[in-house]
Amino acid sequence: MAQSEFMSPQQDALEHLRVIRSLMEKAHIYRAISAPAAALGGILSVLCAGFAGWSIVQGQGLAVERGSWFLVEWLLILGVTGTVNVLLLAGEARRRGQPLVSDGMRMALRALVPPLLVGGVLGVGLIVYLHNHVMAVLIWVVCYGLALLATSSFSPKSLIRLGWVFVILGLLSFVAWASSGEIRNLPHDQGLAALLMGVSFGLCHIIYALCVFLSPKQEALVVPR
Amino acid sequence: MIDFDQLDKTIHEKSRLSIMTLLASRGEWAFQEMKSELGMSDGNLITHLRTLGTAGYVREQRDESGTRPRTTYHLTSEGRVAFKRYVDVLEAIVKTINPS
């Protein structure tokens, strides 16, 4: 507090108001998706999409057909990543002396569930009943982005940026896909859908995790004396 | 003209101000959570919480029902009023700054 002794009362007051503002902002931040879980999901997605890419290279072309495995594989990845995410959030909550279902988590669930539910039901419906994998993936990508953006009032900036990346990528991919009849009319679209999943849920999550790991941690505002 | 003595001396200390701010931002905070958020040592945090408790601004609550006892803190209505008054005075002081 020696610094305060050399400050004018106005500067001192300004400094104290800054402390209040930063702490108020910090106290309301909740990271619903932990970076290690995002990295794991990203790596699994890239591996899964890589397998589809390998099939294409093997000569089957983009029109690769792998039966109902597409949905099973991606639901498995979602299950594994989701479980790891919950375990990591539980560990973090325990470390902070908070219950897992904290005010922050309730707030996050309220924001995340509606767009994820809509995307999930529409996507699965498109795959199971209409066999339109690309459209399902595009809906998943856009709805996931919208879900992240719905948490913008309490999420760290990195998650909000990730939300925008998903929304923009989903919309651009839709325009590219819709405007290209040759690709749209492939006999089977699982290969292309897998590649889209790899780029969006794979690469974007890996880049997000790297940005979080490499960013300097916010320092505590009060220095222990 | 601002009377700087209007600033509540109990709150006008960075550590205690930070504690008051956290408690004002949300209903209740567990001790460990507050410690991790503020980066303070156990002893330092307890001392400041006691000071705020003695002033009647903060109330402690112990929950022994779980496997581990959990201590949480929250602002009293007196503490909430004092914090608001403190922020108002700070704002009034800042307004006296000459932009030039």
Image (cartoon, grey):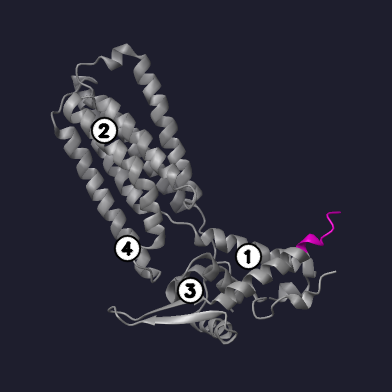
Q: Position of residue B99 (x, y in %)?
A: 83, 54
Splitting the image into 4 quarters, where does residue A205 fall?
A: top left
Gap between marks 4 and 3 measured at Cα: 18 Å
Q: Is residue A33 visible?
A: no
> Residue at (13%, 28%) from the top-left corner?
A67
Please identify the quadrant where the N terminus of chain B is shown: bottom right
Label 4 chain ID = A
A50 in relation to B55, above or below = above
Quick one: A213 or A122, which is closer to the camera? A122
Q: Mark 2 packing: few (<14 Cα in 10 Å), some, or many (20+)?
A: many
- Circles 1 and 4: CB distance less than 8 Å? no
Residue A90, which numbered label? Answer: 4
Residue extending farthest to the top is A181
Gap between marks 1 and 4 measured at Cα: 29 Å
Q: Earlier in the sequence, mark 1 or mark 4?
A: 1
Q: Which contiguous range is marked in magenta?
A: B94-100
Question: Label 1: which residue?
Answer: A19
Please identify the quadrant where the C terminus of chain B is shown: bottom right
Label 1 chain ID = A
Question: Label 3: which residue?
Answer: B35
Is B71 left, or right, of B68 in this rendering?
A: right
Is A190 left, or right, of A103 in this rendering?
A: left
Question: Label 2: which residue?
Answer: A123
- Circles 3 and 2: CB distance less than 8 Å? no
On whether disc 1 and disc 4 are found on a single subunit, the reply is yes
Helix, strand or loop for disc 3: helix
Gap between marks 3 and 2 measured at Cα: 44 Å
Q: Earlier in the sequence, mark 2 or mark 1?
A: 1
Helix, strand or loop for disc 2: helix
The answer to whether residue B91 is magenta is no
Gap between marks 3 and 1 measured at Cα: 16 Å
